[in-house]
Amino acid sequence: MKLPATSSFKAPVKFRIRPTADNLVPIRLDIENEGQRYKDAFTWNPSDPDSEVVVFAKKTVRDLKLPPQFTTQIAQSIQNQLTEFRSYEGQDMYTAEKIVPIKLDLRVNHTLIRDQFLWDLNNYDSDPEEFARTFCKDLAIDDPEVGPAVAFAIREQLYEIAIQSVASAREIKISKKGRRGAEHMSASKAGGNALDLMKLFRFNSSVVRKRKEWEVYEPFVDILSNEEVDVLEAREERNTR
Amino acid sequence: MEFSQHDPNLKLNRPGEPEFELYTIPSHSSWFRWDDIHETERIALKDFFDGSSISRTPKIYKEYRDFIINKYREEPSRRLTFTQIRKSLVGDVSLLHKVFNFLDKWGLINFGAASDDSKDLLEDKKLKNRIRVEEGAPIGVRAVAMPNSLKPITIPPFGVNGRAVVGETGVKLPPLASYSDIFAGLAELKRLKCANCGERCKSGCYEYSKDNYRVCVKCFKNCNYEENKSMDNFKYNDCTGNGITHGAAWTEAETLLLLESVTKHGDDWELVAQNVKTKNKLDCISKLIELPFGEFMMGSAHRGSSTGPTESMNSIKQGLSVSSEHQEITQTGDQVDEHMNESEQNGDAANQEPLAKRKRIASLSDAGSSLVKQVSRISTMVGPHITAVAADAAVTALCDEISCPREIFDGDDDYLTDESWSPTMLYESERAHQIDASEMKEKPSESETKETSTKKNDIPLTLKIRAATATALGSAAANAKLLADQEGREIEQLVAAIIEAQLQKLHCKIKHFDDLELIMDKEYAEMLDLKECIVEQRIDALQKAFIAGVSKWRV
């Protein structure tokens, strides 16, 4: 299922949720039951047996002291997302060298993070967790929940992009352009987010950004007070309803 | 991009060329050349050099590298972080991170920077000089929650911002319910099992004194044990206090055996376990560690007993007395004062000595430990200062009223040099070990051994009790004093910080006021000018009015 793609050989690659060592699925849960709302986001290893899902759901319910109806709902939600992921497995996915911009805009407890950077989908050594760790260390973030949240956000976006590329790969196949043409198109079509590498890494242009762009790509971290957190939470609630 | 002219190599300063700024890098990186890419770099970062993609070329690598190094050298003293440079470089962040790590590892950047502890990035939210608070009691002091248990407790972490400073994150979460599922299973295994009904003995069990037969309280009451064991031979064993003991409670006899065998055999746990027949190796080791002087026993057993086995025996017994105080509960009433008094003697001595002091007492009895227990319980309830003061007062009172124990406690003063007040020959201090006065040791050892044997018979029971409790109290007092000292120091530091902050505040305010004053002065001058102007204008107007002959013109 996972072909080690040598970079020069741009054959269609099988679906990998994230071109890194572990193939993890980002799972997002948002379950509402009798006035109690459980929101969570984490990564799951799809090679774990499915029995683990139920065990995990039970443990979560017990640790967080939720009413027992949540168990089935949590398990179901996880299963659904896993099945969806597995449906993509085995599909072809064109990954030409693709550097996509990743944007972070999340709030974890009292920390607000906004950031933007580039990520290479084709880089099989990339590791969102390591990035998140460096991020927290460099910015001296004390809250231990921020790291995983950042890693999760990155993975989620990569997942979306991967799904898109699978979808577009399917389209290309259907449009019967043939292999060669498909590859050529994949660079521009598959994932509109991909940056135009030709332009960026041209021989006579510099890789260093102009100073005025530095702020765009700089992380913005803010520690909120309790009132601001309440305000934001209320707004989020309203938006999701 | 500008290329700096600085020569990055160590120790190179060619004569005749303009003065370069020396950029220090470790000598193992001396292969580095500013103008070129070295083989080391090619190997370590081969992504750039295998021609695999447009975004990874040697030229691009060199740009990344040069930029990062230059950025670092803008301010060599601060530690450059990855986040600071990644905003300025176009490219995959993972790859950039790889380059950054490579440079960092080889010392090409951050070589002269401060270590990770002084992060300056989000400083407006944090105090500049964090006061380092040490977590827990100082080394050698153990604070126990209840006199019953041997489990040390730690001071809950606190820091300047209400968060622990030393090595901890700020958020403390309660243990999850599933934690107990996973780890309770392990703890369950260690509990006692009733031999009869197979149930766990939670609160107490009865142990048959002749062998390892245990029944729970219920079975004992119902006489549900084997027929050939009579009821009298069962001894009640309270299990609750010994949370850490693996699967069994340590009776006093066992502890005594353990201590004896440890001093005899030192680290040879097989032999120790053999001697203490009812406990296995691990139990012995863990029990020894739990004992207040256990660790030091293990150490000093190696130091050789130039003082002879008898002394160590007695020191073991002392250790035992302290431990027995933790294990037994009995009620005794008003002898507390006396015992408190006694402890003063030991309190003084203990305060002057390192904590792992060993005092030797001829022999012990069990009944005396109850008072010690009570006293130590009381002392944990009140603050450490109070305990110290109480111990002081008690001891002076005791010294005055009873002379006989004083005789016993006082002894040859000459062989202990460092103390102003020497404990008696009944006391053997650790310092005597540490002072390499071997001749002194031998002399007292002989005299001690002789006198011990004689004194053994002479000292009545109550005095032994007192001595035992006194020493226990003394060690408690020493603990308390050290804790109090530490707290005092912390408070001092905090107060100093507060004062400094206040001073700075005042300073700022004063400066502010000075500025204000300047401004006010200027404004005042302007006002005066303005006033003059207006006055002149008025005069002009009046003159013109007069010239024009307007008589009744009101101004």
Image (tube, coloured by chain):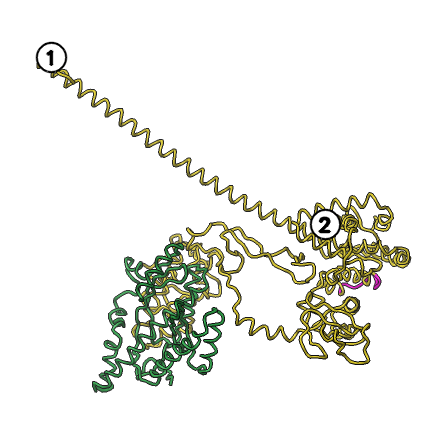
Chain colours: A green, B yellow
Q: Is residue B502 above or below residue A117?
A: above
What residue would you read off at disc 2?
A: B351
Q: Of helix, strand and loop, which one carries label 2?
A: helix
Residue B172 seen by the camera: yes
The residue under the point 73% across, 48% down is: B391
Q: Chain of mark 1?
A: B
Q: Quadrant of residue B100?
A: bottom left
Mark 2 and mark 1 lie on one chain; the one further toward the N terminus is: 2
Overall secondary structure of the magenta stretch?
Answer: loop
* Picture coordinates of residue A149, whole percent (x, y): 40, 67
CA gap, disc 2 and disc 1: 103 Å
Q: Which residues are magenta?
A: B302-310
What residue would you read off at disc 1?
A: B551
- Depth check, front residue: B191 or B63: B191
Residue B263 seen by the camera: no
The residue type indicated by label 1 comes to: Ser
- Depth check, front residue: A171 or B77: A171
Does residue A109 belong to the magenta stretch? no
* Picture coordinates of residue B259, whole percent (x, y): 77, 66
